[in-house]
Image: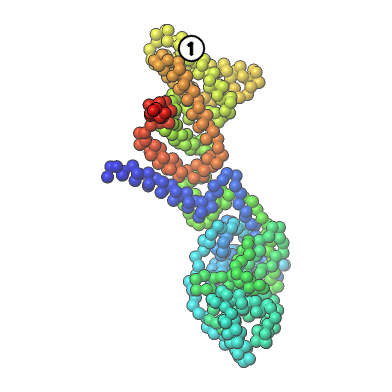
């Protein structure tokens, strides 16, 4: 059981991390790339009417979990009106009420919608075959003939509806002409199609929607047909018979009802305006999570104060740098002074920039090492010697800052961001290695530390890595799992394979 303990821990960490990651990406829409924007649409419905006296009630259909879209924000704009929202069958309606209106009234409903990668709304169950329409002659016989002729040229419910619509729009025969002659508008055409589909016991409904076109004004709803194929509702274009809604089509309401119903008012008018809006994809994902009642955002970094967020943008990269050090030390075999000194120096390089940071680091360590050799002649105890090294390091940093400022080199001012204690310990360790193993080992470890710091810096300034670990901090569980896995590696390091390649016997006769 003990041999499977670590693999089990790694499996649990990776599963939890990837599960949360895929949920945030595919369900909530958090972006994988930095500075990514999402296409949103702002849709505004303008309703106007004339009161006829007394208290007025205006009921207006508004979107209710539209297909392929998420409602990110809603605003109801009116003056002196009370407002409630309610469900009316498959539709949702806004109910405006007022007691003493005067003059022509105008109400506004505005919503911001974002397109979903996949459908979130659950399909309604199959309503079952509908009742046959009660038609009088000659319409009954004509409807039976139309249904029989369409059924012979179709294979299923969807193809039946498309063939029927095409027959209605093409040159109709005498039976179809009896129905088409009464269909002057798209709405009449859909009513006729629903009636004929009922003759085949196929459930169908009328759908009204808005095409999302940038900077469009005074739009009127478009009428579509939907039929249920026993699994889901399928959209049919009433003019062409094509299956499926066009791109960026927002379903507004269902049924053969007017979008505005009034009490004690007359002459209702409704028009729509649409504009495209580009919004940060992270903001859109947060709004979508709130709309879906997801608790993920409640436990994300975005709820923290901005100052704290900026701090964690740096701290979250430290585990990544630590994993890099483990990889370079245990697998590659790079020798460094200390375990975390290179990654702390790499954090300092983020402020000093790479070239200036390398020059300043090399200069401070070189001067500090020279003074450390002088302190060795004074025969000081360990703690006083370390304290003296720290003081000397601070004095060197101060002198370099003043000198660079006088020379107009502003990068030198950021030398104060170097971790002084880490520099002091690095100087102490380097001097000990110099004395015990010689200058070559000390210089080799110093160059290795600087190389690892540079690699850590290049990793941590990568905007994609910064974005991924800030938006998806659960990925740190994978970093932890990889670190645990590397911790069990006991094989040869790459540097050892190069050092001892002569002992492998290759090339010997």
The image quadrant that residue 480 belongs to is top left
Q: Residue at x 31, y 44 (%)?
A: 4
User: Could you say where residue 72 lies in the image, as x and y percent from the top left?
Assistant: 57, 56
Helix, strand, or loop for circle 1?
Answer: helix
User: Could you say where residue 391 lies in the image, as x and y percent from the top left?
Assistant: 48, 16
Question: Which residue extends farthest front?
Answer: 509
Front in this rendered view, residue 293 or 226: 226
Can residue 486 be seen here? The reply is yes
Question: Which residue extends farthest top?
Answer: 378
Q: Residue at x 57, y 28 (%)?
A: 354
Can residue 333 be seen here? The reply is no
Q: Is residue 140 above or below residue 417?
A: below
User: Could you say where residue 355 lies in the image, as x and y percent from the top left?
Assistant: 58, 26
Q: Is residue 164 left or right of residue 390?
A: right
The image quadrant that residue 252 belongs to is bottom right
Q: Residue at x 63, y 20 (%)?
A: 405
Quadrant containing the N terminus in the rendered view: top left
Q: Residues within 10 Å of mark 1 (few under 14, many from 20)?
A: some
Q: Is residue 145 above or below residue 231?
A: below
Q: Residue at x 49, y 77 (%)?
A: 128
Count of numbered circles on the image: 1
Question: Which residue extends farthest left?
Answer: 1
Q: Is residue 261 above or below residue 196?
A: above
User: Could you say where residue 255 lies in the image, as x and y percent from the top left?
Assistant: 59, 74
Front in this rendered view, residue 3 or 423: 3
> In this figure, which residue is indicated by the disc labeled 1?
371
Quadrant containing the C terminus in the rendered view: top left
Q: Is residue 322 above or below residue 401?
A: below
């Amino acid at each position: 059981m003990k041999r499977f303990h670590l693999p089990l821990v790694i499996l649990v960490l990776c599963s939890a991390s990837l599960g949360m990651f895929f949920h945030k990406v595919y369900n909530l829409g958090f972006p994988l790339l930095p500075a990514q924007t999402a296409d949103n649409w702002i849709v505004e419905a303008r309703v106007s009417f004339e009161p006829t006296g007394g208290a007025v009630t205006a009921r207006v259909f508004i979107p209710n979990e539209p297909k392929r879209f998420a409602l990110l924000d809603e605003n109801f704009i009116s003056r002196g009106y009370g407002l409630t929202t309610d469900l009316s069958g498959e539709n949702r309606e806004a109910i405006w009420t007022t007691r003493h209106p005067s003059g022509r009234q105008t109400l506004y409903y505005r919503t911001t919608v974002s397109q979903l990668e996949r459908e979130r709304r659950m399909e309604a169950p199959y309503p079952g075959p509908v009742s046959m329409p009660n038609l009088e002659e000659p319409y009954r016989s004509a409807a039976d003939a139309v249904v029989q002729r369409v059924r012979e040229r179709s294979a299923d419910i969807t193809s039946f509806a498309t063939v029927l619509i095409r027959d209605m729009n093409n040159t109709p025969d005498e039976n179809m002409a009896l129905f088409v002659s009464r269909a002057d508008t798209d709405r009449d055409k859909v009513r006729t199609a629903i009636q004929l589909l009922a003759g085949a016991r196929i459930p169908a409904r009328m759908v009204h929607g808005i095409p999302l076109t940038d900077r469009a004004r005074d739009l009127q709803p478009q009428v579509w047909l939907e039929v249920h194929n026993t699994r889901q509702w399928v959209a049919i274009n009433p003019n062409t018979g094509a299956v499926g809604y066009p791109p960026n089509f927002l379903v507004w309401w269902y049924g053969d009802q007017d979008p505005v119903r009034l009490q004690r008012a007359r002459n209702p008018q409704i028009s729509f305006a649409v504009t495209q809006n580009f919004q940060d994809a992270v903001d859109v994902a947060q709004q979508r999570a709130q709309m879906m009642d997801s608790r993920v955002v409640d436990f994300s970094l975005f709820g923290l104060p901005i100052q704290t967020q900026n701090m964690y943008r740096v701290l979250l990269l430290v585990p990544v740098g630590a994993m890099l050090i483990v990889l370079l030390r245990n697998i590659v075999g790079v020798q460094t002074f200390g375990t975390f000194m290179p990654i702390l120096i790499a954090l300092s390089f983020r402020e000093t920039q790479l070239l200036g940071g390398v020059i300043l680091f090399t200069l401070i360590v070189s001067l500090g090492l020279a003074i450390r050799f002088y302190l060795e002649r004074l025969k000081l105890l360990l703690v006083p010697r370390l304290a003296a090294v720290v003081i000397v390091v601070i004095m060197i940093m101060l002198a370099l800052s003043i000198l660079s400022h006088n020379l107009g080199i502003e990068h030198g001012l950021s030398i104060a961001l170097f971790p002084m204690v880490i520099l002091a310990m690095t100087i102490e360790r380097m001097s000990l290695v110099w004395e015990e193993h010689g200058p070559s080992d000390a210089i080799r470890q110093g160059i290795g530390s600087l190389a690892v710091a540079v690699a850590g810096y290049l990793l941590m300034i990568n905007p994609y890595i910064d974005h991924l670990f800030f938006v998806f901090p659960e990925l740190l569980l994978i970093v932890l799992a990889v670190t645990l896995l590397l911790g069990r590696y006991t094989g040869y390091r790459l540097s050892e394979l190069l050092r001892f390649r002569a002992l492998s016997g290759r090339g010997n006769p």
